[in-house]
Image (cartoon, helix red, strand yellow):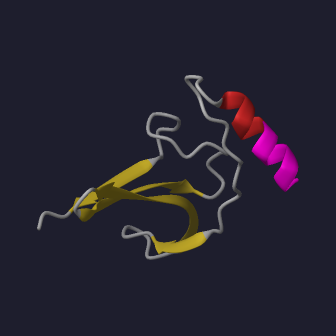
Amino acid sequence: TDAEWAEVLKACEGGRFVVQRRVVPNAEPVIDPNTREVVDWSAIWGVFLTPQGYGGTCIRALPADGGAVIGHGASTTTKLATVFSYA
């Protein structure tokens, strides 16, 4: 519940870690360039912000059936793409 979530965050104040809620991603269709087959992937989209505003984007993804953790190093099939913007 929202109250439980607020309580957990309050208990973590001043600690070295923050508890995050697990999100089940929606599958995103991706065309395999070798087979031209459409395969579902799960992706995490992150945004880099600076005091001046938008700084870039980071996307980590792996095949939808590749596991629950979409992290660099968590799987040999995880892909990483980063875009930086400089104004």
Q: Is 21 situated left or right of 55 in this image?
A: right
**Residue at 44% across / 39% down in the picture?**
72
Q: Nearer the viewer, residue 45 or 12?
A: 12
The segment highlighted magenta reads: 1-7
**Residue at 18% across / 64% down in the picture?**
85
Residue 74 vertical placement versus 15 (above, below): below
Q: Nearer the viewer, residue 68 or 5?
A: 5
Residue 68, image x, y percentages: 67, 45
Residue 73 vertical placement versus 25 (above, below): above
**Residue at 55% across / 23% down in the picture?**
16
Residue 45, image x, y percentages: 47, 61
**Residue at 72% across / 36% down in the picture?**
10
Q: Is 9 situated left or right of 84 in this image?
A: right
- In which quarter of the view is residue 13 placed? top right
Q: Is 80 situated left or right of 76 in this image?
A: left
Q: Nearer the viewer, residue 87 or 26?
A: 87
Magenta stretch, main secondary structure class: helix
Q: Nearer the viewer, residue 30 or 84?
A: 84
Q: Return the residue found at the far left.
A: 87
Count of picture labels: 0
Q: Is residue 58 magenta?
A: no
Residue 23 vertical placement versus 71 (above, below): below
- For the C terminus, the image quarter is bottom left
